Amino acid sequence: MPFFKRTKRTHSKTALLHHNEQTVQTAESSRLSDRLDQNLHRIREQTGHSRDIIIRTLSHMFGSDCTLAVIYIDGLVDTLTINHSIMDSLTSKDYEEKLHASNPAEILSIIKNRFLSIGSISDLEHMESLISAMLEGNTVILIDGSSRGIIASSIGGEERGVEEPQSQTVVRGPKEGFTENIRTNTALIRRKIKSPDLWIVDRKIGRITQTDVAVMYLNGIANDKIVQEILNRLDQIDTDSILESGYIEEFIQDTTFTPFPTMTNTERPDAIAGAILEGKVAVLVDGTPFVLIAPITIFKLFQSSEDYYQKFDIATFLRLLRIISFMVSMLLPSLYIAISTFHQEMLPTTLLISLAAQREGIPFPAVVEALAMEITFEVLREAGVRMPRAMGSAISIVGALVLGQAAVQAGLVSAAMVIIVAFTAIASFVAPSVSIANSARLLRFCFMILAATLGLFGIMAGLIAMLIHLCGLRSFGLPYLTPFAPFIPSDQKDVLVRVPWWAMLTRPTLINRNNAKRQKMNQRPSPSNGKK
Amino acid sequence: MIRKLNLLILMLAASLLLNGCWDSQELNSLSIVSATSIDRSEDEWVISFQVVIPQSIATQTGGGAGGSQSPITIFSTRGKTIREAMQNANLEAPRALFFAHNSVLIINEQVVRNEGVRQILDFFLRPVESRETMSVLLTKDKASNLLEVLIPLEKITGNAIQRVITQGQENLSQVKNIKLIDFASMVANPYKSAMAPELRVSGNQAEQSNLDALKSTRNQAVLKLGDLGVFRGDKLVGWMNRKESRGVAWLSNSVKNLIIVTPCSDREASRLSSYRVIQSSTQVDPKMVNGSVNMMIHIQTVGALDETSCTMDLTNPDVISKLEDTIAEQIKDEVLAAWKSMKDLNVDVVGFMDMIHRKYPAASKHLTNSERPLQELELKLNVKVTVEHTNMINKPFSNLIEPNK
């Protein structure tokens, strides 16, 4: 392993050097020419004469013989903005009569300052910024005779609206979910936290994709060191593409070789807002509705945003239920294997006999039976996700009948095993976060092999190893088992139990050392309070 | 460093994989033994196992012929030692015998009289699999016969026997469920004698061993708890009958729920009442009087009148206190019967010597040297009976028919 790490490090160093050379080279030869045809030629050449690049030339502006070019990429721009705010004003007759300018630079500044009814406008000098502005969906205006241009913001194009998130549904709580557009997403969060302290730091990551990445946090509440650490790690990423937040997650998480996620993601703006208010940092990536949260503890993965909207008692119950379900989905098949092949004395006699009766005539050992059934279930599950919707019911019928009934009747698997696998499967869907459910999914197989070789001893050894691993894990410097290891009494209020909101006096201690106070004390409702 | 790490991984993987599922046993490769019996013939141990046949017990769809097959089967083997006999079982049993669910151990009377239980206890306490909670029972007949009796309601006879004993212990108090570990510690205790209940077949045992017996409504034979076998050291010395074993229960403070049948009065000896003990406590206090030890026994019971055929005014406190006296006499009678039997058999099943040993070590040393130490003790009995209530009705129903009392 150390050998592997060393080679990786040298690789990245050389890549970085290479990249720097490239940028230096391009910077020298990137200034715009003052001849429009040359610029347009260069644009066409650089984009490979792609058909979606629209170049509209306007000539004889303001009485002069200047030629103007409006350049944008079809589909990325908002057609309404182009038509009404840019083309309309450029071709308007009213101004043409009043204004006369001969100098191209003057014309450009008149256009910029008087004509364009667009909020965000900036100047342009380099070919690189022209291309990248265009690719973002801005409109570029160039004029013959000037080596400068204008970037007019016209970002738009087709996009999905704000819909109910598919992956994390709630009974009570907001039904909106993030979209693929980073600006919509930041707006969704800002709408929930109307504070100037909600700061956004932008990064562009991916040499080719130039993906927008935004780091959002509450200034003064988030731990500066954690924010800085996340930004540093983001800055170190040097890759050609970022297509989803999963790319970022794998680049910046603390440990790769762990079944447990050290960052979590969500589609729900309210969950992100809640995390930000606790002092956590959100990483938004353009092009995906999944927003990352860091740092997290393992207990965060068992919490749903709904916990905070429901009454505290049921929320507490559900949290305990989720942890139990996690243990069940991780351990149940292995416990069955261990007890039925090593520790038969642990079962009550009648249960042992009914299990033994079911196993009569089953040709495989319990491990093989369990592994086969678990793999079958995983296949079914994966098929269910990828399959066209229309075939879903067909597959579920086949799955239920073939696996549930026929396999038992054919004497290939025992009925008890079907129950075990089914319950394991259902328990794995209880986890509110897909990432923790996935870690249970993988660990389940390890535990099954341990149980098959060493029985309960194997499971125990595996659990101890897992616990040691969990104690060593860190998420952006935050111990993964906080607030149990290290034990923080004041943070117990929102881990296994959730106390009523009026008792939630402080924010989690380790995440934000400063400004921990959430609300004033003694807000417990009582009749006398109502009278005042 | 890398080599060390690789070596470590290799070792871990090897230790995980090379043991090859060491002692794993699939459920369908086990013969689950539910009861064991021990006999002796021609200087050899005869061990019989009652093995459960799971297919015929579990009600399963597609599980084949449930019900037409006997739920249990018996293997009998012989050998010079118990272990050897057990090993010989592998000559005939198709699956490995699995003892962890053995709930009953039945020992033949002749075995415990002649050989004692030391070898049996040693054998059953030694292996990993064996359960210390199995019930120890004695029988006057051939012990393996008891395993053959089919019991309706319960398909696994071994479990059924254990339930009969625990039921008896809870609702009758005269029998006690003696677990193997308790039995062993009683045998090992020099100041206390061991005891174990007897199980017998009443009826035609051979008929009830046939599966057809389960088809008739009346059983040809039933398993029944009988006397109480008492030990001196590790050998059986005698039996106590029902009345005596109740007395032992009173003395050893193990009465929980018991019906005492008592005549109404001397005049009406044929008319009986039932008194149910709800709560009872016995305190035994050894006391030194003039160099000899007196056992002061205080029995306090609280109970209710469950049934009566007498005509009496139960609302009258005097009548109740008279009733209480009669019941106390009944209890005294049982206790004294037990005491007499204990002295005759020279066994100390209650553990009097143990109590004396704790309170007067010197006296106990003197007593243990004596041949029959119980003869030197004197029993001072003090029974207090309380009739707490007479259940839902006060006056006896007989009063309605014979109102003139």
Image (spheres, grey):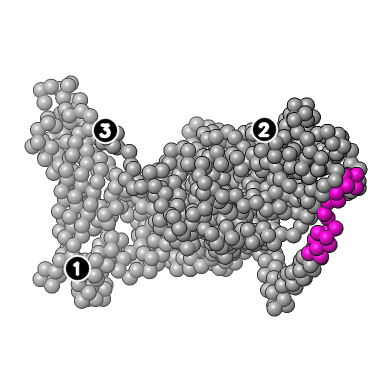
Res. A438 mark: none
Mark 1 lies on residue: B376
Of tags 3 and 1, the one toward the viewer is 3
| Residue type marked 1 | Glu
**Magenta stretch containing residue A328, yes or no?**
no
Res. A161 mark: 2
In this rendering, the count of numbered labels is: 3
Residue A123 vertical position relative to residue A462 in the rendered view, above or below: above
Which span is picked out in magenta? A18-40
CA distance separating discs 1 and 2:
100 Å
Q: Can see residue A43?
A: no
Residue B61 vertical position relative to residue A511 in the rendered view, above or below: above
Disc 3 packing (10 Å; few <14; some 14–19; many ≥20)? few
Res. A531 mark: 3
Q: Quadrant of residue A161?
A: top right
| Residue type marked 3 | Lys
Left or right: residue B385 compared with residue B219: left
| Residue type marked 2 | Gly
Residue A295 vertical position relative to residue B151 in the rendered view, above or below: below
Disc 2 packing (10 Å; few <14; some 14–19; many ≥20)? few
Chain of the residue that carries numbered disc 3 in the rendered image: A
Q: Earlier in the sequence, mark 2 or mark 3?
A: 2
